[in-house]
Image (cartoon, rainbow, N blue to C red):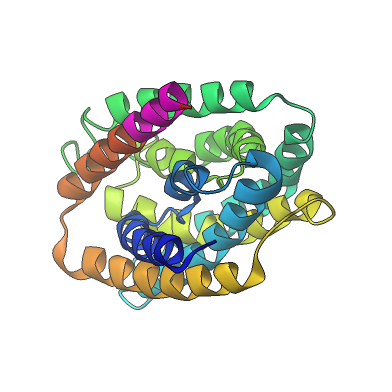
């Protein structure tokens, strides 16, 4: 891979990590279509690299939110345990699922979530109480699907937490903690077949960690819950459009 391409990858991943850190997601939901422009093999190149990046960026985002005391530790750790068990199942299934099906699942999921993110949230209806039991139940299929897509569960879990009653900032903080370990457990089925440039991976992990931590601190200090929710909706619409263009062009 030439130097110019590496620079584009590093700068792009830094910006994506900053945005994903603000949302507490881990970067993989955006990194999968982004890396797909440069790496041809979804299952053996893009997914393992994205999952590792997701774990690292989520971990640093969690540290940023924790410094502002936004993490609700009980639901975060409970959801992390559930997702950690279920995510590897999805990663294993991805080894036998046609890539076109995986991309179809990705596009369907982000379109639905983008629509839901522009509906009322707990910031706009303070009488809503979080429903942790529902969140736990939703985490099982979310983790399996995310493992299949190689993106970590954050991009589905964060909006799901908003929909069951958590304020957007709290949902982002919980998500950052909850998706860290599942991102690494989902990586396990890929270890025997991964084809990753370790030098490139090291550079992307470094900028990803920095971007995620800074993004989480920006959200903690300066971004309102309503703005955070709408930013998520806009971001996944953009990433969906990028992937559609990529599919049409390729």
Query: Residue at position x 75%, y 54% from top?
Result: 194
Residue 241 counted in the magenta span? yes
Seen in the picture, residue 197 relative to 20 is either above or below; the reply is below
Nearest the viewer among 108 and 246 is 246
What is the quadrant of the N terminus in the image?
Answer: bottom right
Image x and y of residue 177, in percent: 51, 62
**Seen from this angle, which residue lies furthest right?**
192
* Image side of residue 114 versus residue 134, left or right: left
Q: Which residues are magenta?
A: 240-249
Residue 219: tell me if it is visible: yes
Residue 34 counted in the magenta span? no
Nearest the viewer among 142 and 82 is 142
Query: Residue at position x 35%, y 78% from top?
Result: 67
**Seen from this angle, which residue lies furthest front?**
2
Query: Residue at position x 39%, y 26% from top?
Result: 244
Query: Residue at position x 27%, y 36% from top?
Result: 233
Residue 128: tell me if it is visible: no
Image x and y of residue 135, in percent: 51, 39
* Image side of residue 84 versus residue 237, left or right: right
Dominant secondary structure of the magenta stretch? helix
Image x and y of residue 28, in percent: 50, 50
* Image side of residue 130 versus residue 167, left or right: right
Image x and y of residue 66, in percent: 39, 73
Q: Residue 20 falls in which quadrant of the image?
A: bottom left
The total number of labels drawn is 0
């Amino acid at each position: 891979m030439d130097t110019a391409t590496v620079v584009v990858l590093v700068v792009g991943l830094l910006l994506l990590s900053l945005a994903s850190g603000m949302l507490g997601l881990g970067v993989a939901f955006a990194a999968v279509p982004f890396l797909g422009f440069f790496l041809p093999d979804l299952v053996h190149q893009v997914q393992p690299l994205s999952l590792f990046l997701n774990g690292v960026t989520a971990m640093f985002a969690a540290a940023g939110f924790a410094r502002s005391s936004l993490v609700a530790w009980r639901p975060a750790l409970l959801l992390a345990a559930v997702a950690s068990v279920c995510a590897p199942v999805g990663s294993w299934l991805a080894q036998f699922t046609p890539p076109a099906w995986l991309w179809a699942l990705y596009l369907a999921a982000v379109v639905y979530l983008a629509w839901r993110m522009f509906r009322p949230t707990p910031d706009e209806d303070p009488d809503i109480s979080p429903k942790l039991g529902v969140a736990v139940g939703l985490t099982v299929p979310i983790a399996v699907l995310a493992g299949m897509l190689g993106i970590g569960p954050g991009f589905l879990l964060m909006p799901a937490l908003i929909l069951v009653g958590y304020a957007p900032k709290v949902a982002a903080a919980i998500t950052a903690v909850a998706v860290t370990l599942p991102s690494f457990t989902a990586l396990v089925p890929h270890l025997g077949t991964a084809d990753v440039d370790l030098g490139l991976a090291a550079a992307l992990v470094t900028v990803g960690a920095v971007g995620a931590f800074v993004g989480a601190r920006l959200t903690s200090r300066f971004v309102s819950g309503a703005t955070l929710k709408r930013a998520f909706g806009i971001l996944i619409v953009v990433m969906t459009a990028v992937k559609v263009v990529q599919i049409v062009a390729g």
